[in-house]
Amino acid sequence: MTEVALPADQSPRPMGLVSRIFGVIFSPRATYTAIAARPTVVGVLAVTLLISAGMTLWLLSSEAGQRALGAQIEESMRQAAEQGREITPQAREFTATIVKVLGIVAAVAQVVIAPAILALMSTLRF
């Protein structure tokens, strides 16, 4: 990768959160130069996690998402029954409950687990 050298009197000016988010899309070279000069990740990480968690919650809580997830679980149960495993009514009731709350659980897990994994990776310094 080539280095972009700026003249001594032209250091990149600091960019705000919104400027960085849109700058990465519309003017990536200038934005990445400014980010490299003053790296901050917390704001963009928070925005990314919230958008990702919100989309997961929306998808898994929607009627179509719950139907798809329920169909996938039913198929797994059908395959287990074909292999001779007994599927009790309590197990079916439990999976129906899981389908209803999985959107919330997945969204919260993304917001909690992703920063923990990133923190762990940053301490390992591959």
Image (cartoon, rainbow, N blue to C red):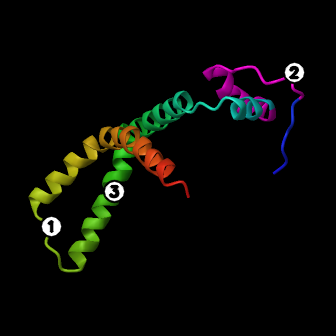
Between disc 2 and disc 1, the foreground one is: 2
Q: Residue at x 72, y 28 (%)?
A: 23
Earlier-in-chain disc, 2 versus 1:
2
Amino acid on which the number 2 mark rests in the picture? Asp
Mark 3 lies on a secondary structure that is: helix
Q: Determine whether, in the image, residue 30 is placed left or right of residue 72.
A: right
> Start and end of the magenta stretch?
7-29
User: Any mark on residue 22, and which?
Assistant: none
Tag 1 residue: 87
- Furthest-right residue in view? 7
Tag 2 residue: 9
Q: Which residue is drawn at 47% across and 49% down?
A: 123
Mark 1 lies on a secondary structure that is: loop
Q: Estimate the spatial distance between the alpha carbons at disc 3 and disc 2, rounded to whole Å.
A: 62 Å
Q: Nearer the viewer, residue 6 or 75?
A: 6
Position in image of residue 36 (x %, y %)? 71, 35
Within 10 Å of disc 2 (Cα), the crowding (few <14, some 14-19, many 20+) is few
Residue 12 in the image: above or below residue 58:
above
Q: Split into 4 quadrants, where in the image is the C terminus?
A: bottom right
Position in image of residue 45 (x %, y %)? 52, 34
Q: Which residue is drawn at 51% across and 48% down?
A: 122
Circles 2 and 1 in contact, beta carbons < 8 Å: no
Residue 2 in the image: above or below residue 87:
above
Q: Is residue 8 magenta?
A: yes
Q: Which of 55 and 31 is in front in this view?
A: 31
